[in-house]
Amino acid sequence: MRNALPQAVSRRQILGAAASGALAALEAGRAEAKEGRHTSMIGVPFAAHSVVRVGLIGCGGRGMSLLNDLLGIEAVSVRAVCDIVAEKVAAATEAVTRAGHPPPAGYARGDHHFEQLVLRDDLDLVYVATPWNWHVPMAVASMRAGKHVAVEVPAANTVAECWALVDTSEKSRRHCVILENCCYGATERMVLRMIQAGLLGELHHAEAAYIHDLRGILFARDGEALWRRAEHLKRNGNLYPTHGLGPVALYFGINRGDRFTKLVSMSSPELGLTAYQKATTEPRDPRRSERYACGDMNTSLLKTALGRTVVLQHDVVSPRPYDRNNLVSGTKGCFRDYPPRLFLDGQEGHDWQSIDAYRKEWEDPLWRRLGEAARSSGHGGMDYIMSWRLVECMRLGLPPELDVYDAAAWSAPAELSEKSVASGSEPVGFPDFTRGLWNERRTGQEAGV
Ligand SMILES: NC(=O)c1ccc[n+]([C@@H]2O[C@H](COP(=O)([O-])OP(=O)(O)OC[C@H]3O[C@@H](n4cnc5c(N)ncnc54)[C@H](O)[C@@H]3O)[C@@H](O)[C@H]2O)c1
């Protein structure tokens, strides 16, 4: 077995630097909010772009996948790429030139070299696909440098970080889009259309989850293992809320007529990672001394202003099949995913029906149009559709479909669940990141969500 010490040292360095960067970004955001007026970014259109010039920060597993999607979209020009690992910048550069584009500028000189990338004058949009602690410093720096930013999930780890994104977006007049690809799944987009057409009646309850056995990834020697397992050492709550919550928030029209008002959370005991550690590492492996704080299954219950409820779960350490739950219940019926199925009022018996019969009528127009091209991309095609639609909104001068208020509302359960768990499951209030505009009707997005 290889010596794991260099890996442990570099992880500490990465997290330490990220934490100080996040703090600086927070202070900058607060100072800006104090000075400036809070003018909402809801419904603010992009300027129309004939070409969308993109810079990418983070060329790891996710960044390379996003890059390949972007390279397959007309009117995208990737001008700059950044990673702390020079070989990853080289691989990203190679991917760009292989796709027939000029080589992008490379930034590989340390943790803060991204600060130079965002200052370039030939970028419209920055994609951020780095470890969680870097999302907010990078997003804030991008917006302050006049660029729109698209951030991987969760967009932020704490409520203060969520506010830093909101404050900076409002002050800079730049959008902070959350790259919540699950909102662009074929099923999610179709169910959203069915809900908007009233097929499920009035909605009252939903269930969302991120249940994905990541034990092998968390204990690998590279990629996410370098930073993600460390989150389980110090935090106990829902570390990754947005894949489940994003689609459900759109079903409920969160920030578009409803909002989350409070959350209460419980965690089951921590067992899974410790069992995996014991079963897969040698006694002298430094990882053997790690003690994990995060309970295996975290369950939160969210309440909305309209009185509706959401059960939100997170478990990445148990042997069970992948599941985002994706359940939504209304006065006329219920949809539940994995596999996608439906029960409509008046139906005989107690069995679900497959949703397949509804696909012809209710398939999302984007999927109908792009499905073939999309299917070879990440996560069954949802990734390509997400980036394609963001680029289209920028080309046509539309508002983004997912904005900074979505990024904040869907990411906030991370810290809120931790707080509730730490307090013995007391309810915690949910900030209104829209500053009172959650009930406004959206305009200019009729074609999208
Ligand atoms: N939406 C999805 O389906 C999905 C899937 C996977 C990962 N993600 C998210 O994408 C992000 C990245 O995950 P990943 O799987 O690619 O992890 P990864 O570890 O493979 O890649 C992260 C990359 O960021 C680089 N990096 C770290 N600090 C940096 C800095 N200061 N400046 C520049 N580069 C830096 C690392 O060297 C690495 O190459 C995470 O937020 C993760 O949650 C989302």
Image (cartoon, grey):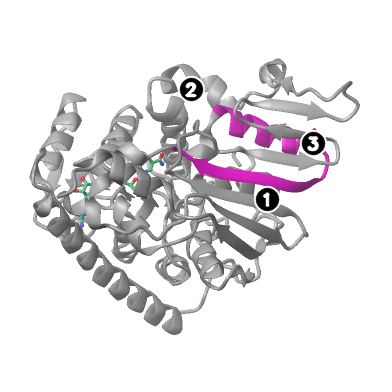
Q: Is residue 156 left or right of residue 446?
A: left
- Residue type for callout 3: Leu
Residue at the (36%, 53%) spot, across then down: 149
Tag shown at residue 370? 2
In this view, the residue in front, 151 or 248, is: 248
- From the image, which quarter does the N terminus lie in? top left
User: Viewer-nearest of labels 1 and 3?
Assistant: 3
Q: Please report whichever mark, 2 or 3, sits nearer to the chain's N-terminal start.
A: 3
- Residue type for callout 1: Gly
Tag shown at residue 253? 1
- Residue type for callout 2: Leu
Q: Secondary structure at mark 3?
A: loop
Is the Cβ of the residue at disc 2 closer than 8 Å to that at disc 3? no
Q: Is 290 included in the stretch rendered in magenta?
A: no
Label 3 CA crowd tier, 10 Å (few <14, some 14–19, many 20+): many
Span colored in magenta: 186-212
Residue at the (65%, 57%) spot, across then down: 301
Question: Residue 346, image x and y in percent?
Answer: 91, 26
Q: CA distance from mark 2 to mark 1?
A: 25 Å
Q: Please report whichever mark, 2 or 1, sits nearer to the chain's N-terminal start.
A: 1
Q: CA distance from mark 2 to mark 3?
A: 27 Å
Tag shown at residue 200? 3
Question: Residue 432, image x and y in percent?
Answer: 61, 68
Label 1 CA crowd tier, 10 Å (few <14, some 14–19, many 20+): some
